[in-house]
Image: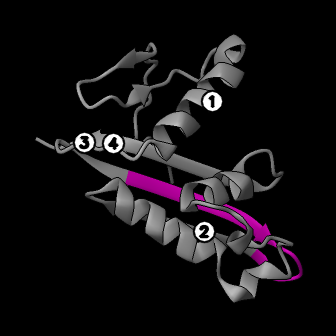
Amino acid sequence: MTSETVIETAEVDISEDSEGLDFIDESESDNAPESKEDFWAAFEDEKAESLTTVWVCDASFDVADQGSARDIFASTTKEKVVNRLFAIISSPDLKEPCDFDAASFTTKQQAIRAFFDGAEGRNLFIGLVPVF
């Protein structure tokens, strides 16, 4: 049995679209720290929204003594993505095993960033897919 690539990847230079969202090329290691900050700045920007794209999110992380958790979803607005991610990370079932208290942050975006940023075994992918 052979497998085929379902999603093609492409390199994209950092540029700004009309809605103010940054598209980031993370293939160059020299740009990684700056690109990471660009991503979080765009994610935390309340005005960052796009009417011609769908937000695609893939979140995965390890839960101590329970295995791995993963959620893949798509949404038409960033607000729905933020609300769903926050609901996941603020679950009482994750507070103790993941040693994380989402209530200690001012905004939902700050809590999401603190949960995923720099934590080994916690991965977050958010992409904008054009709708035609």
Q: Residue furthest left?
A: 132
Q: Name the residue under label 3.
A: 50
Badge 1 vs badge 4, beta-carbon distance below 8 Å = no
Residue 3 appears in the rendering: no
The three-letter amino acid code for the residue at tag 1 is: Glu
CA distance separating discs 1 and 2: 24 Å
Q: Nearer the viewer, residue 99 or 24?
A: 99
Q: Mark 1 points at which residue?
A: 37
In the image, residue 84 above or below residue 78: below
Q: Where is residue 105 in the image (x, y as percent from the top left)?
A: 69, 63
What's the magenta region? 56-67
Q: Which residue lies furthest to the front in this view?
A: 106
Of callouts 1 and 2, the N-terminal one:
1
Query: Nearer the observer, disc 1 or disc 2?
Result: 1
Of callouts 4 and 2, the N-terminal one:
4
Query: Nearer the observer, disc 3 or disc 2?
Result: 3
Q: Name the residue under label 4.
A: 47
The three-letter amino acid code for the residue at tag 4 is: Lys
**Left or right: where does residue 112 sit relative to residue 9?**
right
CA distance separating discs 1 and 3: 20 Å
Residue 63 forms part of the magenta stretch: yes
